[in-house]
Amino acid sequence: MGVAGLLAMGLAGPAQAQSSPATGVQAPVRFLVVADREAPLSAVSGGRVARVYAQLGDTVTKGKVLVSLDCSDLEAKRAAAEAEFNAAQLRYEAKAKLQGLQSAAALEVELTAADVNRTRSQMRIFSAELAQCRFVAPFDGRVARVHVKEGQGVAPGAPIIDLVGTGTPKARLNVPSNWIAWLRPGAHLDASVDETGERYVLNVTRLSGRVDAVSQTIEIEADFLGDTSRVLPGMSGRATPAKSGGKG
């Protein structure tokens, strides 16, 4: 079931949860637990997987190489481009010295300078392509899924590895639109997680800028308060306005 389907459960009749916290009991609203940060890494170009350095559940630090592709052909091309650049640089320096001795025309110096720029650009192109052969963690996190194995061929756009942040998880939910009358960032919701049965307090942090005209709901995000060591992205649960109805 997709995120939209899960959030829509229990919202087919939003009129059941029309009252404010002070006027009656609220019908619970479904929520989905999401990571504070997510990064589904995918291949920019095709190739063969050379090494997989991270496995499911591993904690990784920002900058760590997670997967690398076999790009030996690109490495050879970059080495050749670097050799051409070095040679062009030497030719330019030689022509510049000759010009100082009035033994080389200005045009010859300009042509060798242009050759230096051309070969430098070619070397940078291959360096940029080589950088796409390594999949690096963009932040500190945990490996949520590894899509590839060593030796496997991948096509451009193919998923490689999914990374989730290790910060405090968030709850994402669609609530009846008339909750806007009292719902503000800082408002609290009482919540229970289905998978563990544990109860939490959610602190509302964000409200969408529009109401869904069909379901008459608005999407919000909220942070979990307290110990969230047993709360994982993908879990779900139910939430209602806190009994106090106020801010924390």
Image (cartoon, grey):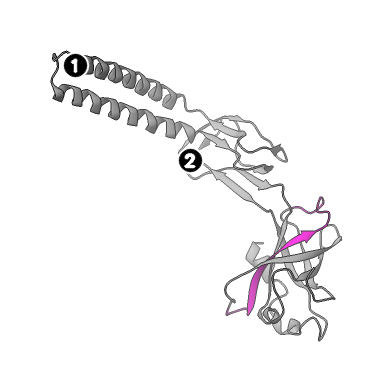
Specify the quadrant that holds the C terminus. bottom right
Please state which amino acid type lies under the numbered disc 2: Ala
Q: What is the spatial separation of the Cα atoms under label 1 and label 2, in whole angstroms?
A: 53 Å
- Compared with residue 245, is residue 158 higher up or lower down, i.e. above or below? above
Q: Residue 238 carries which label?
A: none
Q: Where is residue 96 in the image (x, y as percent from the top left)?
A: 22, 18
- Compared with residue 168, is residue 221 higher up or lower down, i.e. above or below? below
Report if residue 48 lies within the magenta region: no
**Start-end of magenta stretch:** 213-232
Pointer 1 residue: 100
Q: Where is residue 28 in the image (x, y as percent from the top left)?
A: 78, 74
Give the residue drawn at x 78%, y 69%.
188
Q: In which quarter of the image is residue 163?
A: top right
Please state which amino acid type lies under the numbered disc 1: Gly
Give the residue drawn at x 84%, y 76%.
244
Give the residue drawn at x 63%, y 66%.
4
User: Is disc 1 surrounded by few (<14), some (14 to 19) or many (20+) residues within 10 Å?
Assistant: few
Q: Where is residue 222 in the image (x, y as percent from the top left)?
A: 71, 64
The residue nearer to you, when weighing 234 against 200, is 200
Q: Where is residue 126 in the image (x, y as percent from the top left)?
A: 40, 30
- Mark 1 vs 2, N-terminal side: 1
Q: Residue 155 carries which label?
A: 2
- Compared with residue 164, is residue 130 higher up or lower down, i.e. above or below? above
Q: In this view, does 92 lie to the left or right of 173?
A: left
User: Is disc 2 surrounded by few (<14), some (14 to 19) or many (20+) residues within 10 Å?
Assistant: few
- Compared with residue 84, is residue 189 higher up or lower down, i.e. above or below? below
Q: How many labels does the image show?
A: 2
